Image (cartoon, rainbow, N blue to C red):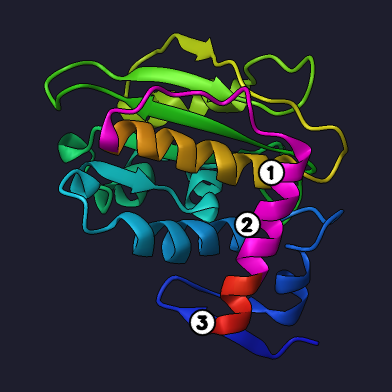
């Protein structure tokens, strides 16, 4: 089934996309964009610090990762208004082939944050897979966004117990970090259990069903 089910200015979910929120399924970039654009934005957009935040579109991150032309890169970054931001939440896909826009098999999260717009960025990488180190993609995207070499910290976080939940962990990590940034809460990403992830999937499906 390819009929459009849910649409919004930046994207759409078709029936096959919605099924990916079910247990055991691997999320695609449109699933992550939906959660960022619709669920998190609707939940937090009235917070006074919301203007400091960017939840980045996975397809834009992919384009930035493989864009080597300085002028084209500037065009990609131009609309982000980076000089006025203090929190960038960046989903990363392990796709290494720029000709395949829907490739890859794993999602992780890169977060850039700073106390004020005059201070340097702090880089933290969160990966729910066991034994993963900070990938070159995270370093490359960070440098292209900020224009500087960077030191990326490997952040502590819960680990997945299967091969399909990485994208949902990215959603959970993103919201936890967002809440910590907006409200000044202590950040803890070590207590996100498989049951929590399954419940998150179900809650998203309920939101989609109510539209």
SS for dot 3: strand
Residue 10 visible at all: yes
Is residue 99 placed above or below 206 in the rendered structure? Answer: above
Residue 12, given in percent of the width and then of the height, sits at 56, 76
Magenta highlight range: 183-205
Would you name the residue on which mark 2 appears?
A: 29
Q: Residue at x 27, y 58 (%)?
A: 45
SS for dot 2: helix
Q: Quadrant of the N terminus?
A: bottom right
For the view shown, which residue lies furthest in the left direction? 118
In the image, 68: left or right of 52? right
Mark 2 or 1, which is nearer the eye? 1
Which of disc 2 and disc 3 is earlier in sequence?
3
Q: CA distance from mark 3 to mark 2?
A: 15 Å
Q: Is residue 189 on the magenta stretch?
A: yes
Q: Residue at x 40, y 48 (%)?
A: 55
In the image, 8: left or right of 27? left
Q: Are marks 2 and 1 in contact (CB under 8 Å)?
A: no
Which quarter of the figure has residue 113? Answer: top left
In the image, 69: left or right of 157? left
Would you name the residue on which mark 3 appears?
A: 7
Q: Which mark is residue 196?
A: 1
Which of disc 1 and disc 2 is earlier in sequence?
2
Is residue 85 placed above or below 40 in the rendered structure? Answer: above
SS for dot 1: helix
Which of disc 1 and disc 3 is earlier in sequence?
3
């Amino acid at each position: 089934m390819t009929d459009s089910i849910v649409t919004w200015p930046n994207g759409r979910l078709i029936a096959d996309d919605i099924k990916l929120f079910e247990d055991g399924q691997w999320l695609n970039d449109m699933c992550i964009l939906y959660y960022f654009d619709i669920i998190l934005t609707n939940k937090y957009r009235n917070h006074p610090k919301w203007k400091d935040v960017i939840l980045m579109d996975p397809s834009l991150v992919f384009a930035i990762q493989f864009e080597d032309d300085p002028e084209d890169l500037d065009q990609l970054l131009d609309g982000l208004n980076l000089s006025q931001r203090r929190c960038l939440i960046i989903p990363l896909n392990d796709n290494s082939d720029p000709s395949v826009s829907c490739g890859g098999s794993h999602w992780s999260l890169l977060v850039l944050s700073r106390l004020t717009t005059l201070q340097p960025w702090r880089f933290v990488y969160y990966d729910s897979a066991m034994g993963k180190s900070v990938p070159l993609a995270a370093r490359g995207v960070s440098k292209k966004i900020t224009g500087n070499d960077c030191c990326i910290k490997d952040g502590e976080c819960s680990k997945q117990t299967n091969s399909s939940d990485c994208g949902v962990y990215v959603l959970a990590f993103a919201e936890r970090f967002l809440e910590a940034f907006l409200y000044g809460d202590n950040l803890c990403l070590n207590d996100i259990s498989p049951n929590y992830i399954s419940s998150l999937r179900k809650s998203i499906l309920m939101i989609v069903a109510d539209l």
